[in-house]
Image (cartoon, grey):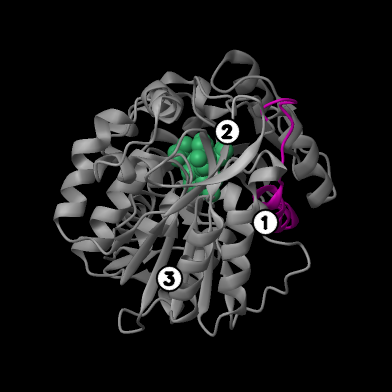
Amino acid sequence: MIKVADLNIPVIEDLDINNKKVLLRIDINSPVDRKTGKLLDDSRIKAHAETVKELLDRGNSLVIISHQGRPGDDDFISLEEHSKILSKYVGKEIEFVDDVIGPYARERISKLGKGEAILLENVRIVSEELIEAPPQQQSKTFLVKKLAPLVDYYVNDAFATAHRSQPSLVGFPLVKPSAAGRIMEKEVSALSKIFNKEDSPKVFVLGGSKVSDTLKIIEHLSKNRVADRILTGGLVAELFAVAKGINLGKTNMQVLESKGLLSLVPRARKILLSGAPLEIPVDFIVEKPNGELSSEPENNVTGTIKDIGPTTVEIYSSFIKEAKVITLRGPMGVIEDERFRVGTKSLLKASIESPGYVIIGGGHMISMLDKDVEINPNKIHVSTGGGALLLFLAGDKLPALEALHMSWVMNSGKS
Ligand SMILES: Nc1ncnc2c1ncn2[C@@H]1O[C@H](COP(=O)(O)OP(=O)(O)OP(=O)(O)O)[C@@H](O)[C@H]1O
Ligand SMILES: O=C(O)[C@H](O)COP(=O)(O)O
């Protein structure tokens, strides 16, 4: 059992999860090369192999579900490649089933033998999965009604998606005895231990393209006075620059417009007015129409922004060097193109070389960590979570954890 605030979260030992049929929700959502459609990084897949192996060793048969990307985005792809990589790390075939709630998937689940494991197709092809709602409502979805009767237990190992109140994360615990998987258990236990409110200054490096999510995170960090400094990059930084009245030029405004981000300017402006301790880049690496790269000051941008510039790296690194805890999520640049990784890699290096404790989250951000960096738990925590990590650190109760607690109360009669 793990305790988080007033929640009791059951773990695998708290239920008799042996020789049964288990529905396992993992988060193997991974960065995808936009040109080839291939996975750029398999850290999350490798991390979840531990829980898969343990449940199989306990004689269970597994129905594994996960999402990849979001409908309409380039990285919204099939999980077929993921199943091959997961098989490699587990050391046993994890059969890909090209279905989720249809008759083919249900028949395959019914016929699963002891020690067998299947990975169903991207759960977000089921439209209900995109709707966030309370667990009570989610337990009545087709996803839950079609799959729950076919299994004995539900195990949620998807810490990185624990902030989503979607059916695959909060719907099953109300109808099945449920527990946290090993990744969920480790992340929640480690983060609860290492992240003490009194440790300061706390610096957050927030970049990437999930701007709406990040605004919510910054609102919570600021409201709960968790962050002493927020250093922005990626599209997050561009939005705040516009909110500050900086003219980023036609091309970058078109990029923001095309992603529907300009409608968030008033919300970003409100955050600035609230006194959030937020920094934006003073220079950017831009790509000119002729393909040339150059660094331009934030008040005279003419090219397409692709990364933060050298002066910004210096300024941000000076904050990082003074921090007690540094949390980084979301890259500073378009890291799919290796020319635009300097900002992200420089801040990761400054963090690791600083005296502070480093927490790294986010699929793309983790992929930028040099493979030869020693992950000493006394210095670094590499989280599988991105948005989930930050909302947890901001003090939010994650819906998936609350659902596991509710399952425990319902099945054990204890609170
Ligand atoms: N200046 C920029 N312009 C356009 N895209 C950018 C820019 N900077 C970063 N990005 C994009 O941000 C994306 C990663 O953002 P994202 O928020 O998903 O980060 P992450 O570390 O994967 O976190 P999570 O795991 O929560 O998704 C990359 O695809 C990258 O190309
Ligand atoms: O990468 C992540 O942060 C998780 O997989 C959640 O993905 P989402 O932001 O698309 O829900």
Q: Is residue 337 above or below residue 122?
A: below
Q: Earlier in the sequence, mark 3 or mark 1?
A: 3
Q: Earlier in the sequence, mark 1 or mark 2?
A: 1
Between the residue at mark 3 and the residue at mark 1, the CA separation in whole angstroms equals: 20 Å
> Which segment did they paint magenta?
34-57
Image x and y of residue 293, in percent:
64, 39
Residue bearing the label numbered 3: 2
Task: Kindly indicate the quadrant of the structure image that contains residue 104.
Answer: top right
Q: Nearer the viewer, residue 7 or 234?
A: 234
Residue bearing the label numbered 1: 47
Query: CB atoms at circles 2 and 3 under 8 Å apart?
Result: no
Image x and y of residue 98, in percent:
68, 20
Element at label 1: helix
Task: Name which residue type carries label 3.
Answer: Ile
Task: Name which residue type carries label 1.
Answer: Ala
Between the residue at mark 1 and the residue at mark 2, the CA separation in whole angstroms equals: 16 Å
Answer left or right for 312 relative to 58: left
What residue do we see at 69% from left, 44% from top? 339
Between the residue at mark 2 and the residue at mark 3, the CA separation in whole angstroms equals: 28 Å
Task: Name which residue type carries label 2.
Answer: Gln
Q: Nearer the viewer, residue 129 or 206?
A: 206
What residue do we see at 58% from left, 55% from top? 343
Residue bearing the label numbered 2: 68
Q: Is the CB of the residue bearing disc 2 within 8 angstroms of ligand 2? A: no
Query: CB atoms at circles 1 and 2 under 8 Å apart?
Result: no
Q: Is residue 271 above or below residue 63?
A: below
**Which is in the foreground here, disc 3 or disc 1?**
1
